[in-house]
Image (cartoon, rainbow, N blue to C red):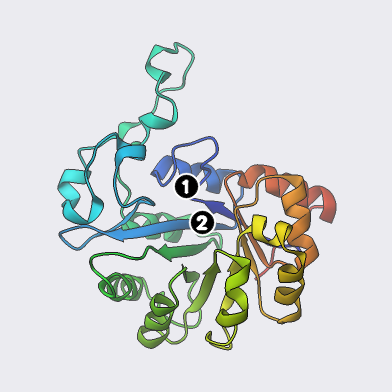
Amino acid sequence: MRPQVVAHRGASHDTAEHTLLAYTRALEVGAEALECDVRLTADGHLVCVHDRDLRRTAATRGVVSTMNLAELDQLDFASWKNPWAELDDEAPDRDPETGKVLTLRKLLETVADHGQGVELAIETKHPTRYGGLVERRLVELLADFGWDGRDSPVRVMSFSRTAIARIRHLAPDLRVVILIEKAHHWPLLKQAIGPSWILGPGVTELQDHPTFAKALRKSGRDIHVWTVNTPEQLQTCLDVGARAIISDKPAYMIQLLDAQNGGRRYAR
């Protein structure tokens, strides 16, 4: 069975990451899951933003955790991706609303409305000034959609083992992914993680450390790999038996996989 193709921050190679436009583009090209990072605003809203500060994606020195949602809503999160668009007469018109800060609630609504079995991989970012409140607010929001149980289309990811343990405590039936940044973390990590936790290694670590890749495959756990954008990286994932690949280029990954699998798609 071929791996699930997960759109990393949406179709982020071609479109500004974490914007509504990035996610709708990902759905249009057939991504089977959407990945997002979440942070908590000063007034308690979960928003889809990767960096703690906004210099890269919104051209301001503001920090997400110190700003209210209304303040973030005034910022442009899309122009950085194509700063010369206003000078390009052939550039397509863009609805400004699709380039604003995206709340997790809005993304969940988008997935719910899509109605074709699309899943969500939500990463909670740590360290953060709010600590475990992020996971608590996340589970509360998922409960609003009825997505905090065994049949949820959502899985929660983090590099923080403590954060994953919180999710397990708050919503025991949710699928969880422990992200692995460095291969040398594995010998200790494997002794401290739960029996059903999914493994989330980076593809470069798998390529640079074949012994690490072999150990993960021998573990018998599901493996979800990030961030996979080339044919060589995809082959690494197939060799390790990955069940999901997280890519900035979901359309390209789907094309490569469909060519190998005769059009057979991922099935959960």
Position of residue 261 relative to residue 78, above or below, is: below
Residue 112 screen position, x and y as percent: 43, 61
Mark 1 vs 2, N-terminal side: 1
Residue at the spot 48% in from the left edge and 75% down from the top edge: 152
For disc 1, the marked residue is 23
Disc 2 designates what residue? Answer: 34
Please state the total of marks drawn on the protein image.
2
Q: Is residue 64 above or below residue 149?
A: above
Q: In the structure shown, which secondary structural element does the residue marked by tag 2 occupy? A: strand
The amino acid sitting under disc 2 is Leu
Which element type, helix, strand or loop, lies under badge 1? helix
Quadrant position of the C terminus in the picture:
bottom right
Horizontal and vertical percent position of residue 70: 16, 47
Mark 2 Cα within 10 Å, few/some/many (few <14, many 20+)? many
Q: Between marks 1 and 2, how big is the CA–CA gap? A: 7 Å
Q: Residues within 10 Å of mark 1 (few under 14, many from 20)?
A: many
**Are discs 1 and 2 less than 8 Å apart at CB?**
yes
In this view, the residue in front, 231 or 189, is 189
Quarter of the image for residue 75 reads top left
Image point 31% across, 52% down: which residue? Answer: 52
Q: Which residue type carries mark 1? A: Tyr
